[in-house]
Image (cartoon, rainbow, N blue to C red):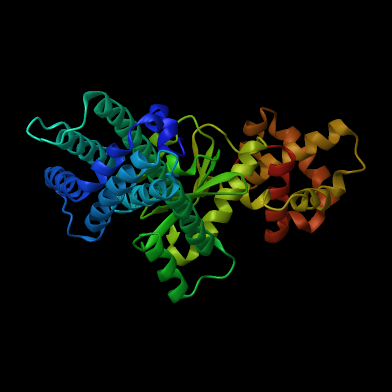
Amino acid sequence: MADTLEELEPRLAGLPRHVGEHLRAVRPLLHEETLDSVRATMRAQGRSLTGGQGRGLALGVETAVDAFVAAVADPGRPLADTRRVFHDLGRTEYQEGHRVDALRSVLTVGARALWAFLVAPERPDRLAADELYLIAAALFGYTDTLAGAAAEGYLDEQRDAAHDWIVVRRRLITLLVQPDPPGDAALHAAAEAARWPLPDTVAVVSVDGTDDEHLARALGGGAVATVIDDVVRIVLPDPGAPGRLAHLRRALTGRRAALGPTVPLRQARTSYRLSRRALRLQRDGVLPADGVLDCDAHLLTLLTAWEPGLTDRLVARALAPLAPLGPAARRALADTLAAWLDAQGQVVETARLLHTHPQTVRYRLRRLRERYGAQLDDPDARLALHLALRHHLGRRP
């Protein structure tokens, strides 16, 4: 980006001194002409020069005219201050919710008005054609420079605002899923900052990837998302609303994701922990990885696979009586015990599940009784055996 008007149009240095003096003399009229044109353009955009941003634009136009007049007289004069003014105006344009090209159109209209004034045939003191030609080349390059500064300011503000929004959303979600439930004041302040109406119920969804902004927009309905531990965490408000979960599943088609249970707002951490653990188990192949997995449909697997090593310890203790046997006998008795527990102690049904003869089942049960004794009649021991065998044999509930 050019630092001086001379960089935009080097031939300005050769202009006679009277050109700069002429522009200084008509500067008040240039202000008037450009502001009148800019006002008309602003009205067409449904805006006014009377508000805060309007007054800023008016000041910016006057600054631009003054800087241009001074730079024609002194082409080596720095343009940094004027660029900074329009960079700040670009930031304000974004804050006010205007389009990125709105300020460019204002600048273009102002430049045209200034040029029309200088070349008006009725002006007796009009400059020579060759002088006007150089001024025109410098003027429109100057306008592009200021428009570029405004666009940079607009994009800088957009980027900063996006970063702030990410920080606000992350703060809200972190507050919801922290170990201790947040206080009322902190929760309401975080929700207000995120412009998020507090729902009665939520569900937390964990999704492979880091495209949190994209997923939040795709889901809509007040969903907020952020990245925690390199995974997108989505807080879905009021999951029971008609069609909301169906829309979630469509939006996440082809993605590995786990849907935590619907819980009251202040229990969001429970939904978060279940979805987080379920996604890990999907990655490990323990839980199905196709489509959005509903944690409520896999609570038993989540329970037995929650703490690495814990269920293995349960298996080791529960199957210790079978340890002295050879691999084939150990497997046959484990299969029989698992089927017997599934069949609630019915021998014939156990035989059907195993595709074997009831007499074979009775024989194996006698061997099991020899090793387990009264444990087979104890409800707690049977529950522990049932869970251990499901894990050990890789069977799904």
Count of marks overlaid on the render: 0
User: Quadrant of the rendered structure where residue 109 is?
Assistant: top left
Q: Is residue 136 left or right of residue 265?
A: left
Residue nearest the viewer, comparing 83 with 148: 83
Q: Is residue 258 left or right of residue 67?
A: right
Which x, y percent locates residue 252? 45, 36
- Is residue 171 at all visible to an observer of this figure? yes
Task: Please report the residue visible at 51 percent of the width from the left and 60 percent of the height from the top.
Answer: 171
User: Quadrant of the rendered structure where residue 41 is?
Assistant: top left
- Image position of 386 with respect to 268: above or below: above
Image quadrant holding the C terminus, namely top right
Task: Please report the residue visible at 30 percent of the width from the left and 41 percent of the height from the top.
Answer: 20
Residue extending farthest left: 122
Which x, y percent locates residue 362? 74, 39
Residue extending farthest right: 324
Task: Please report the residue visible at 16 percent of the width from the left and 50 percent of the height from the top.
Answer: 47
Q: Is residue 201 left or right of residue 126?
A: right
Which x, y percent locates residue 144? 34, 34
- Is residue 246 at all visible to an observer of this figure? no
Task: Please report the residue visible at 73 percent of the width from the left and 48 percent of the height from the top.
Answer: 388
Which x, y percent locates residue 143? 31, 36
Residue nearest the viewer, comparing 134 with 57: 134
Residue nearest the viewer, comparing 28 with 291: 28
Q: Is residue 391 left or right of residue 46?
A: right
- Image position of 98 with respect to 202: above or below: above
Residue nearest the viewer, comparing 354 with 308: 308
